[in-house]
Structures are given as structure tokens and as C-alpha cells.
Image (cartoon, rainbow, N blue to C red):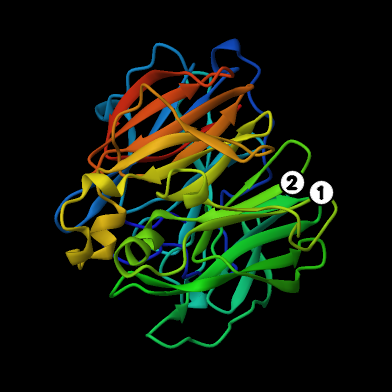
Amino acid sequence: GEEEPGTGEKPGDEAAPSGESTPDAGTMEEPPKEDIAAHTYVTTTVVFDADSSTTYVSLLPKLDGVTIDLANAREFAGWAGSWAADGKLFITDGESPTVKRYGVDEKRRLHEEGAVSFLNFGVEYADSTVLSRSKAYLFNVDEAITWDPTKLEITGSFALVSPPAKAGGLEFDGLDTGRSFVTRGNRAFVAAGWANWDEYTTAEESVIVVIDTENDRVVKSIQVPCPYLDVATSAEDGTLYFSNWVYSIGQTVVNDTKKACAVRILPGQEELDANWSITFADVTDGREGAALQYVGENRAVLSVFHHERVENLEQQADFGELGGSNNWRLWLLDLNTREASLIEGIDWNAGGLTTQTIDGRSFVLLPSGEYDKTTVYELRKDGTVEERWKTPGWSTSIFKLR
């Protein structure tokens, strides 16, 4: 569900199924008992060249003392999404609308167990999210396709919202199962908005679509007065936070459009918390921010765009390039006091922030301005950071397989 730099396309907006599974697709097996594979972590990275991209999946035995060597990684053509469920790894085909399931053996090697194709639904990319052993979602423009990750079979579909376009060539972006998607109980909350990717402009308002994941239906659409909501994150108590991605800031800093902001939904609620919102510029000395992500203990990190580094800012015409430029720093935000401060020890980057909490530890993945390398940091509870590893390309995920 990530957005490929410079393309204006969002892999994952398309999707579609045939309902057929490969002959060897069976039920999910129990993870192997061997100690050598007792802990397996997965990290992915996408390497771009002039005309294409290649995805590399690395399986790691630990998260300390790591060196990423793409020569030892599993290679997949195109932009391939990946996620884990029940000790299995699911990987989308970067060149066809197919999801493949992999098991891992005692030597930490991947073995394909089967696949499910969505070709009959007319989609080009099969980015999905697994909700349970028997249910996964794939969003396809105005419908959601449900499929069974255990049986690798299509099980049905239901209608999604499809609001009309807005002035200025702003088309509804559709729902995505990537960074804008979060679940809580039997509800999924998906942030979405309107954009013109030819010009990298976005609407000044967004929506959060609430889905009943038990009965597979859209419950409501929450109107949000923030531009380009595209990031969703959850606290331990179930409080949900929503914010923008980096590409909304170009129009703001050049054309003085509405400033980026974040909102939240409290536990047990399906409406915005009327007593809490934050405009990033109010806490970052007037700078734009993006990609707020919860990291524990009522704290979040966010990428902050330091516009003072850009000469002739008012003359910048390429908002996409501006949003992905090497002018971002990582800040730490106290969600109670709404005070923010710069995190020292992290270099200038492209702002494309990804975080993951694994075994009680918080990791931050930050790409360079050219998206040609990513640095992974561990964020400690005292707010300091330590670099863990670097990898070529844009590393978009790190998670625990088992």
C-alpha cells in the first residue's frame, strides 16, 4: 500500500479475484518447533531504477547486530507487498494480481505453499491485509474483495464508498490496505482523501471510512477537516490516530493552503474526539509535518519538513519532489501535552516514515532523499535513538514472522 516515489500511483488501489487456488494450497500448518526458527523477523526493501523496481525480502534471526545483504535476500520482480499472519508470510506479485503464501523451515528458508489470483476482478495489483485465519481484504476501487488466507480462496465482495471528484482535478484516492488502514475489534478504520497526482495537490479535507469486518459492510464515513489523511496508527488502549503523508506539504508551503493536522478516535468510539486535534505547525515552530505514528507511552513520532533549508521556496513547482526531498527530520510528540521536540542523532531524510513495535521495542525506518537507501533506528524510551542497520533502496516494513 505504499506510494511509489515520483509516480503518483498508489499500488494497492487496484485489486481483483478469480476464486481459484493452486493445487497445493491447504490449511495453515503449525510453525516448526525447531529452536533455530523460533524467532524469525522479516524486512523488505524496494530498489528503484529508471524504469522498474525490485523487491527484496530478508529473513533475520534477530534485530541486533544485523547486516542486510540483498545478495542473500529473496528477490521479487516489481513492487511486492508483504505481511505476516500465523507464522506464514504473504507476498504480492509485483507484476500480476496474485498473492502467494510462504512457510519458513528450520533453516529459515521460504517455501511457497500456494497462491490466490485476483485476475478475474480486473485488478493489476493484489495488495491486501489479513484480518484473521479465515479472512483477508483486498480493496478494488469501489468494492472490497474478501478471501481466505488459510484456504487461499476468494470468498466474496462488498461495496465501498466512492465519493465524487472535487474541483481542480481532485479524484477520490480510494481505500487502501496499507499505512492508512487500522483495525480495532470488529471494525476497520481507513483514512482516504482526494488528490491530483499529476500536480501533487490534495483536497483540504478527508474521510475515515469505518468497516464492520464481521459482517463485511461499510458502517459510515467520518468527515475530517484535515488534508490528505493517509496514515493510521493505534495506541495500546485502542485510541486511533490519523494524519497525512509527506506529499500534502508542497501545496501548503508554496501556496499557503490548509496546514497538515492530525485527529483521533477514542476507544469504543466511532466519531472524532472533539477535544483533541493537532496542527503540526503549531508545535514545530511553524513547520509542516506528516506521518504521525504511535510509539508507546502516549508518544508519537512524526516527520517534520524544515522549509528553511529550501532556497526560493515560493518558486518551487514540483510539489512531489518537494515532499520527498532530503529536508525532513524526525520529531517526538507528547500526545497528552501536544509538545514536540527534535530527535537528535538522525540525519536529514525524505520523510517517508515507517515505524514498528516488535517485542516491546520501537523501530523507525527512514529513507534518504533519493530513496536509494534506508536507515533503521531503534527509538528508546528516553527519546534517544541508536542506528541498527542500513539497507539499499526504500525499506517499507519490518515485522516479526514468529
> In the rendered structure, which amino acid carries the disc numbered 2?
Thr
Query: Looking at the image, can residue 130 be seen?
Result: no
Asked if the residues shown at circle 1 and circle 2 are in contact, with their CB atoms under 8 angstroms apart, the answer is yes
Is residue 31 toward the left or the right of residue 106 in the image?
right
Residue 131 in percent (x, y) is at 69, 51
Tag on residue 239? 2
**Quadrant in the rendering for residue 295:** top right
The residue beneath circle 1 is: 267
Residue 329 or residue 75, whichever sits in front: 329
Question: Vertically, is 275 above or below 57?
Answer: below
Crowd around label 2: few <14 · some 14–19 · many ≥20 (10 Å): some
Label 1 residue SS? loop
Residue 292 or residue 361, whichever sits in front: 292
Image quadrant holding the C terminus, namely: top right
Question: Vertically, is 293 above or below 9?
Answer: above
Crowd around label 1: few <14 · some 14–19 · many ≥20 (10 Å): some
> In the rendered structure, which amino acid carries the disc numbered 1?
Pro
Residue 251 or residue 85, whichever sits in front: 251
